[in-house]
Amino acid sequence: YVSKLPVDMKVTHLSVNDGTLEGMIHKDLPIASVQYHPEASPGPKENNVIFDNFLSLIK
């Protein structure tokens, strides 16, 4: 478990089950991460922001 992130990282997702870190993004660099399967969301658009963010980072 992560108890503290570096100052240049921002939490984007926490587990609703136990509060563990499931997503983060770097404040200045094109670095983002999620620790689950966003493509397996319960609905068609809940996680589009993750994919949109990824596409903006690689452009």
Image (cartoon, grey):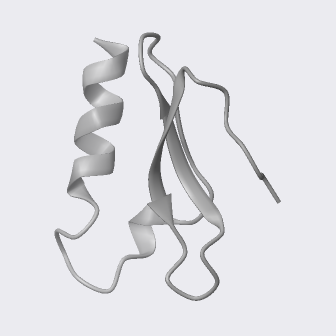
Q: Nearer the viewer, residue 41 or 31?
A: 31
Residue 58 x %, y %? 36, 16
Residue that appears at 47% across and 33% down:
25
Left or right of residue 46, residue 32 in this image: right
Residue that appears at 42% across and 20% down:
27
- Vertical placement of residue 17 versus 10, above or below: below
Left or right of residue 12, residue 18 in this image: right
Q: Nearer the viewer, residue 7 or 36?
A: 7
Of all residues shown, which one is farthest toward the left?
45
**Residue 45 falls in image quadrant:** bottom left
- Vertical placement of residue 39 versus 19, above or below: above
Residue that appears at 83% across and 60% down:
1
- Vertical placement of residue 24 versus 59, above or below: below
**Residue 59 falls in image quadrant:** top left
Residue 48 x %, y %? 22, 55
**Residue 28 falls in image quadrant:** top left
Of all residues shown, which one is farthest toward the right?
1
Residue that appears at 77% across and 52% down:
3
State the count of labels: 0
Residue 51 x %, y %? 31, 45
Left or right of residue 50, residue 8 in this image: right
